[in-house]
Image (cartoon, grey):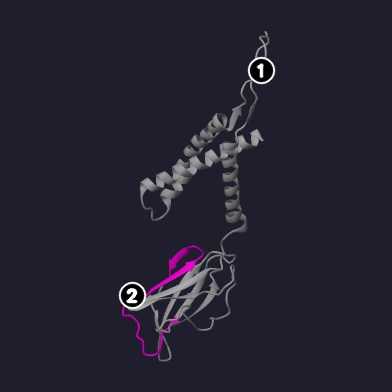
Amino acid sequence: MRIILGILSALLGMLAGWSGLAALVVMLAGPDRDGGIAMGAFFDIGPIGGVAGLIAGIWLFVRFGLVRNATPQPAAETSDPAPRPAARLSLPFAIPVLLITAGLAWWGWYELIRSPYLSHGYMTLAIEFRLPAGMTLPDKEEDVHIEIEEATGYANAMLPANWRAHDGDRKAIIASTSLMYKTRHRVVSLTLPGIPTQSWPIDLPSDPDPTPGFSPWRIASEPSPAKIEMHFRLRADR
């Protein structure tokens, strides 16, 4: 158990030093458009922090991971040397190391084995909004704000050049966005000038297949006097 705990302590120190130094470099360097700074920080500078973290992890294990029992007092004076106190694991050190290792193992399983990403890769969600009769579209693209909530992240939908459309005598809005995560929580929201934000749940499985066509039209999940309708279609990008 001592050997296992010592290896875990060293590996955790290496991971913390590697990622910590790389994150510090990225933070000090500022915004990076093409990701070159982040790649260089992780692969070129990060190993320096990894070596330092490895040494620190070993030192912490030797310093705090092992404690020695108190030396028993001899009952009488003898010529034999006092026995060296036996070392044992320190529970206050071992428990956090094991908990952190378990958390990292779960995260690695989730990211690399279970994979939070869709089996089809990035998929395009085509969205169309149909306004009630008599309601006009905004003049500017900037006045249309469409947000997609997927898992715990948010993204803005893209409006094509022909985003202003119609369905008979009713005006419509065309947009699209990318889906990438396995989750059952997907919500699309639409905000127009002078109209409260309206939201619609996207009824898809956590790892969906492309849909054969558009879903039925539906109104927002919360009743609104605007009565804007939405439907969607999902297609694979590959």
Along the viewing direction, whichever of 114 and 222 lies nearer the viewer:
222
Q: Position of residue 99 (x, y in %)?
A: 59, 45
Residue corresponding to mark 2: 143
Residue corresponding to mark 1: 83
Say which residue appears at 50% left-offset and 73% top-offset. 125
Along the viewing direction, whichever of 67 and 178 lies nearer the viewer:
67
Say which residue appears at 58% left-offset and 49% top-offset. 103
Drawn side of residue 147 relative to residue 207, left or right: left
Name the image quarter holding the C terminus: bottom right
Say which residue appears at 62% left-offset and 37% top-offset. 5
Name the image quarter holding the N terminus: top right
Q: Secondary structure at mark 1?
A: loop
**Residue placed furthest toward the left:** 139
Residue 157 visible (yes or no): no
Q: Position of residue 223 (x, y in %)?
A: 45, 81
What is the span of residues highlighted in magenta in the rendered image? 129-156
- The amino acid type of the residue labelled 2 equals Asp
Pointer 1: residues within 10 angstroms few (<14), some, or many (20+)? few
Q: Is residue 142 magenta?
A: yes
Q: Is residue 13 magenta?
A: no
Q: Position of residue 107 (x, y in %)?
A: 57, 52
N-terminal of the pair, mark 1 or mark 2, is: 1
In terms of image quadrants, where is residue 131?
bottom left
